[in-house]
Image (cartoon, helix red, strand yellow):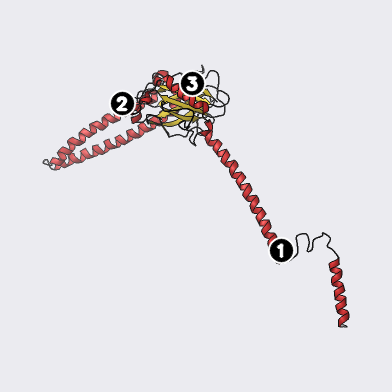
Amino acid sequence: MVKRRKQKLKKKNKTVISKPPKNGIIGGVLGDRDQRTKAGRHNLVSLLLALVLMIGGSVYWGVQHHQYSNYLINNTTPDGTNLQFTQSGTTIALNDVWTDRSRDLIVVHLRYPEAAHQALSSDGRNYKMYLAMTGQKPSKNLQMRYGLLGTDGGGYLFIRGKFQQQAYQVFLTNKKQLSQDSLDSNPAASASADSTSGTITAAMDSADLNSANDKGILSLANNKKTSTATEDYINFRINPYSETTHVSSTNFLTKNGEIDYSAVVEAMSTRDMTKSLQKNIDKHEARIKTLNATIHDYQQRLRENKNDDIAGSGISTAKTSLGQENDTVKNLKDELEKYNNHKFDESSFGHMQTKFTLLTK
């Protein structure tokens, strides 16, 4: 009986083993049902998913980084960026860049601190302008002009033409250094217009406009093919279609196609200037109010005690300060009225430089 059962079981086992599975794999398509096999299968799937995510993430990061780099390269230099002349070391700031809705005029406002006014000329003719670009030129009738709004005001660069949706590199070269110390230590800082033109042009022949930093500043000092030691320049990037370019709701050109300087100054400077002047007026008027209260207090003390020497001298000092504050407020209000009512034209910017060099890559 036992022997018969063993033979029957042996025969059954042979039958099972002799029949191959339909898919040709013992245990099914995904392997047998052993726990170790299942764990290995899960690990393999997880590894494959991790590889896919890692590769996809690297590709996405690369695309985003490339797009962000292009965004920075094509953007206008940000407001407030300090610009240092390469030889004299004098620093001015790019205050802001504006255009109007037609994009036919770009205006750059450069802010001169007191030290810059002492070192740099207020005559626009003592500067040289360059406009560098790749691709199509803005237009055949491209115009550039640079001047300062008064002898102690900021610099204004006007660039007129039909512009493409691309970035342009501007170079402004200082041709006349006023600081004697700077001239003694950097005699090349007052280089002639011809020698400066040669170095900028030669340097730009082999320069890559896309090598500017994230603020749109291009360095020519690392150019091995030419030397920039004889030039004193700043540079920055502009793009009329950039997000960092301000767009005025008013037109910068008249119906006759001329630059409306009053509209430009109104949009770029007058509002900020009048706001600053009014803030200054409020500050001095607050001091006047305090001085009047102080004088009243001292007068009250003298009425109670005619021998109060401190009150007597205090009144004298306060009245002197009060007169100075009243004069200051009057001058500030006169200046505020001038900005509110003054009509600006080309003569407001003194002698303007109109010659420029166009550099195309």
Task: Residue 45: name its quadrant.
Answer: bottom right
Is residue 340 shown left or right of residue 54?
A: left
Who's the residue at 14% across and 43% down the image? 304
Can residue 276 be seen here? yes
Q: Residues within 10 Å of mark 3 (few under 14, many from 20)?
A: some
Residue 293 drawn above or below residue 263: below
Q: Which mark is residue 357?
A: 3
How far across and down, in percent of the image, does residue 192 sit? 40, 20
Who's the residue at 18% across and 38% down the image? 314
In depth, the one of 68 and 240 nearer the eye is 68
Q: Residues within 10 Å of mark 2 (few under 14, many from 20)?
A: few
Q: Which residue is mark 2?
A: 180
Query: Secondary structure under badge 1?
Result: helix
| Number of marks in picture | 3
How far across and down, in percent of the image, does residue 11 sit? 87, 73
Please, which residue is most extreme toward the top here?
A: 256
Amino acid, disc 1: Thr
The residues bearing labels 3 and 1 have C-alpha atoms spaced at a distance of 75 Å
In depth, the one of 261 and 48 nearer the eye is 48
In depth, the one of 181 and 122 nearer the eye is 181
Assign the N terminus to one quadrant of the image: bottom right
Is residue 334 shown left or right of residue 269?
A: left
Assign the C terminus to one quadrant of the image: top right
Residue 304 drawn above or below residue 32: above
Amino acid, disc 2: Gln
Amino acid, disc 3: Thr
Query: Secondary structure under badge 3?
Result: strand
Marks 3 and 2, the one that precedes in the sequence? 2
Marks 3 and 1, the one that precedes in the sequence? 1
Please, which residue is most extreme toward the bottom here?
A: 1
The residues bearing labels 3 and 2 have C-alpha atoms spaced at a distance of 29 Å
Q: Which mark is residue 37?
A: 1
